[in-house]
Amino acid sequence: MDEALIVFLDRDGVINQDPPADFVTNWTEFRFLPGAREALRLLKQAGAKVVVVSNQSGINRGIYAAEDLEEIDRRFKTAVSDSGGEITASYYCPHRPDEGCACRKPGTGLIDQAVRELNLDLERSRAYLVGDRRTDIETGRRAGLVTILVLSGHTLLAGDARDWPVPPDHTAPDLLGALNYIL
Ligand SMILES: [Mg+2]
Ligand SMILES: [Zn+2]
């Protein structure tokens, strides 16, 4: 039997444009990156579980409300479904860095929560994390995932990652390109 395929995805800079003002505060600011919906469709077609893990400290910074994030989340998942993909689940950390929570990446709290709630067995799966920041790559490494850096968001040049303490396993221009390492 094929091993399960689990793909953890950061959101901003991977699925949608990294927002210029740091945060997507409402649905009108959410812009899918080119090829992202196509990539999500291909992942669903391959039977992958797709789990979004995203820091959204704008909530506890008071920049937008939890309800705003819920609406963005609902509408974004609907748009993904409408184009043939599927987000299995999404997990967000609302905390500011100074709150010292376990869920803000590079902590693995969001992944741990997904593993518990979705009964994932990472040991017996092919499991990946795709992200656009150093903290994403550190999160993936800590959780024992294969890490893929995409250059469609915060990190724009592969060379920028060269001296990171935890370098990515792979680098791709965007999510569609990352599928070359996954599918
Ligand atoms: Mg990001
Ligand atoms: Zn948190």
Image: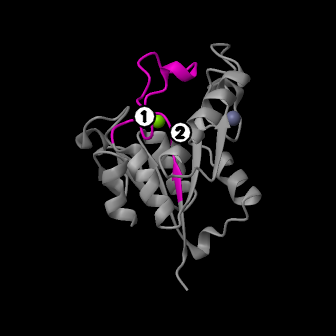
Q: Which residue has dot 1 on it?
A: 32
For the residue labelled by badge 2, is the local secondary structure a helix, a strand or a loop? helix
Residue 79 is tagged as: 2
Amino acid identity at mark 1: Phe
Give the quarter of the figure containing the N terminus.
Answer: bottom right
Amino acid identity at mark 2: Ala
Of callouts 1 and 2, which one flags the residue occurring earlier in the amino acid sequence?
1
Separation of residues labelled 1 and 2 (CA atoms): 10 Å
Whether residue 176 appears in this view of the structure is yes
Give the quarter of the figure containing the C terminus.
Answer: bottom left
Question: Residue 50, percent across and down?
Answer: 56, 55
For the residue labelled by badge 1, is the local secondary structure a helix, a strand or a loop? loop
Residue 79 against residue 127 in the figure, above or below: above
Magenta extent: 7-34
Q: Nearer the viewer, mark 1 or mark 2?
A: 2
Q: Is residue 23 magenta?
A: yes
Quadrant of res 101: top right
Q: Residue furthest front?
A: 82
Circle 2 crowding by C-alpha within 10 Å: few under 14, some 14–19, many from 20: some
- Between residue 141 and residue 46, name the one nearer to us: 46
Residue 55 against residue 166 in the figure, above or below: above
Whether residue 94 appears in this view of the structure is no
